[in-house]
Image (cartoon, rainbow, N blue to C red):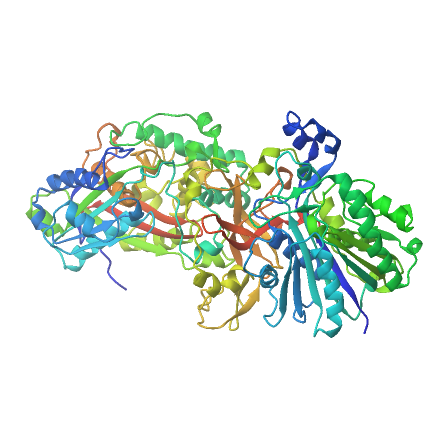
Amino acid sequence: MASGIKDKVAILGMGCSKFGERWNDDAEDLIIEAFVEAIEDAGIDKSQIDAAWFGTAIEEQHVGKSAVPLSMALRLPNIPVTRVENYCASGSEALRGAVYAVASGAADIAMAVGVEKLKDTGYGGLPQRSRGSVNDLFWANASAPGSFAQLASAYAAKHKVSDKDLKRAMAHVSVKSHDNGSKNPKAHLRNKIDEDKVMNAPMIAEPLGLFDCCGVSDGAAVAIVASPEIAKSLGKKDLVTFKAMQLAASNGREAQHNSWDGSHFVTTRAAAKRAYQEAGITSPRDQISMFEVHDCFSITELVTMEDLFISEEGRAVNDIMDGFYDADGKIPCQIDGGLKCFGHPIGASGIRMLYEMYLQMYGRAGERQRKEDPVFGMTHNLGGFPHQNICSLTIVGKEGA
Amino acid sequence: MEVGILAYGGYIPKSRLQREDIFKAHAWFNPGLKGLARGERSMANWDEDSVTMAVEAARDCLGEDDRTNISAVYMASTTFPFMDRQNAGIVADALNLPSSLQTLDFASSMRAGTAALNLALQAAGAASGPILVTGAERRNTKAGSALELTTGDGAASFLVGSGNVIAKLLGSHTESVDFVDHFRGEEAQYDYTWEERWIRDEGYMKIVPKAIEGALEKAGVKAEDISAFCFPVAARNVAAGLAKKVGISEGAVADNLQANCGEAGTAHALIMLAHALETAAPGDKILVASFGQGCDALILEATDAITSLPKRAGVGGSLAAGRKTCNYHRFLAFHQGLDMDLGIRAEVDKNTGLTTHYRNRYMAQRMVGGECSKCGTVQFPKSNMCVNENCGAIGTQEDHPFAEKTATLNSYTADRLTFSPDPPAYYGMIQFEGGGRLMSDFTDIFPDDDLHVGMELKMVFRVKDFDHKRGFRRYFWKAVPVDATGGE
């Protein structure tokens, strides 16, 4: 078996733009904002970057095709630049390219950039567009909330949870993320809410109300990675290194084969097993210090905590209501506000998750800094629909941990 | 062998718009409509047209019988979705019939339905197999018109051929007279109608009796022996007046379904005939006539075989499955009678690649999936590689039809974000009996349908997307609760 990437790559610098409704900025402006922070943090000149990966999902809404928009925005010196897209996991895909380039020895320093400029459609929610000429012939008229909402009906039926108890736990997920987002100056949504407000909000796709859905935001995030040796030679101390990066793509089982019950993510479970193994983690509930998961909708976070083998199957509702995932709980989840409140500029989200891990591990998270010193952090970046998706997982941690 | 009707089927859309609510909207303008403000009219859903209704009536007619011997599909309507693309061909495709058949559209007259049936009865003797006749109408009427209240939407279907016929043709007669009581020209969206009293006195009362008398004579049947007289005119007493004039007993005048359906154009004579057959006893003589630039009259006699015809929803079952609706604005919106603000989401271009459409027609119109000849797994859509992870065989998929299967609901939602002409959009993962599944649109969902995981659903043929820019529409299959179809 492959030996994996554990401790072969370190984070050299990171940057993240303010997320939100950036009415007066183009994608290029957002990229520059995140890049300037990252390159200053890394303490290098851009000529030292050997290769770059560019993640964006709905490029027709902003930059258009190819890697050229990134290369031009940053005036990169004709280095290799690759554009990647994997639904909402596009940011993690860019990161994976950069990390693998360094792990392989093909590059000393590589960069991942994720961006999305969504607030140019004239309406709320994600841009509506063709799903491909053949898919358009038979796919249901499904939106993102409508697809993820179905996790709730299947989960409630499988685990015999009442609709109301499930909705209450989902509400707690959102309340917690709003609390956390209120302490994050870069977050899109910074207002605090309570469970009743979530429960009584207008319905978007049953049973998901307005506050069960994440924000659709503009934003960019950048990660610059290097081998630990290079990082140290550049003066970087207390390295945060990559322990695992795993990705799983649906093969049609969920969409076309009756072995899936609709209550969980087949891909997350497959990727999680591999990620823990690659990172050498044997008891994730005891070992992982914090999570940033793909909380596009409250129910997604709820079932994901089981798919990552943290809550036992059917017990996420209890853990959530016990405050296990709160900022001051045993394992905080979305301590930066998550997709829910930090926001969800699609291509940037996977890198944004890593950004929070990085800040927390260096004690730079300001008002929301976790008191217990984190050792391992895990990000979970999902793309697509529960019945056909991409799941991308990253585990980072202190060097040598 | 004797030629006649082998089976019948009917379909009336689920919504029943209350006429009182139509009247309330127009009382300020035309208080005279009050006389029509009784009962309810059937109302096609936004995704129904004459083709989809014809398909449902045909499925009701054919049941689980073998369809491979059908030699022709005739479709009658004056509201065909396509002016140049054979509509009967779409019906044949949705029914997953073999390509070796004749398809014909019958149009341009309220008499098109009976004309199709009459021709089928004449042609079936020489045909290689039974002929499927369908008549369907989705009426388009001006807001505030009397027709808006008296018309309805619906379809009927008959399988015509030789063998175990449930009703045989005793005789028929046609009068062809260019009597223009109403018309719709090439550029018009709506009918233009002339005075009712003239139509009654000079049209119905003078032209129809000649056709009926001609049919009676050819059939060798006396008027008083007619047990059911199906004549699809909304105005009360027209059929009764005709019956009296030609000597048909008052009790034989069939219900014109004004109270609970409304007159479904050229399909209505066929709908009334299908309805009459539901209760016909062997030996009953049914006279069906329809008026439009003349008159067709057909006399049929029910045979002993009618008692052993398998049960079907029929017109009666379809009528019983109706749900009341009071929302006249929704009706207007479905008929492009309101310039609704549909939002920017509705602006997505729905252009269809005709090459893509043709290549995938078995999937999209026939709902044919695949069955792996190696491991037996069935799946939708069909693919080159088996979806079973323990198999994965390449090139082993045989055609496997899904349209007639029942399915179980695995997960669902009611979505108010995605654009739908009739929000919320209901959809969910459904799992077919015997394997295979689909993230499927649902349609015809009413609050009392009580969607829940584990419930049974069946598939119906509907409009998937309208491309208003180019005048095209795509069809696909959607799920409806089983108990709402009148079939159970």
Left or right of residue A354, residue B442 in this image: right
Residue A311 visible in this rendered orientation of the protein: no
Seen from the viewer's position, the closer of residues B240 and B476 is B240
Q: Is residue B394 above or below residue B144?
A: below
Q: Is residue A290 above or below residue B108?
A: above
| Residue found 88% across the figure and 59% down from its top | B216
| Residue found 70% across the figure and 72% down from its top | B129
Q: Residue B15, image x and y in percent?
A: 65, 41
Q: Residue B10, image x and y in percent?
A: 71, 53
Seen from the viewer's position, the closer of residues B365 and B136 is B136
Left or right of residue B257, residue A35 in this image: left
Q: Residue B262, image x and y in percent?
A: 72, 42
Seen from the viewer's position, the closer of residues A2 and A294 is A294
Left or right of residue B369, residue B406 in this image: right
Q: Is residue B4 above or below residue A10?
A: below
**In terms of image quadrants, where is residue B446?**
top right
Left or right of residue A394, residue A232 in this image: left
Count the labels in the image: 0
Residue B40 visible in this rendered orientation of the protein: yes
Q: Residue A205, image x and y in percent?
A: 48, 38
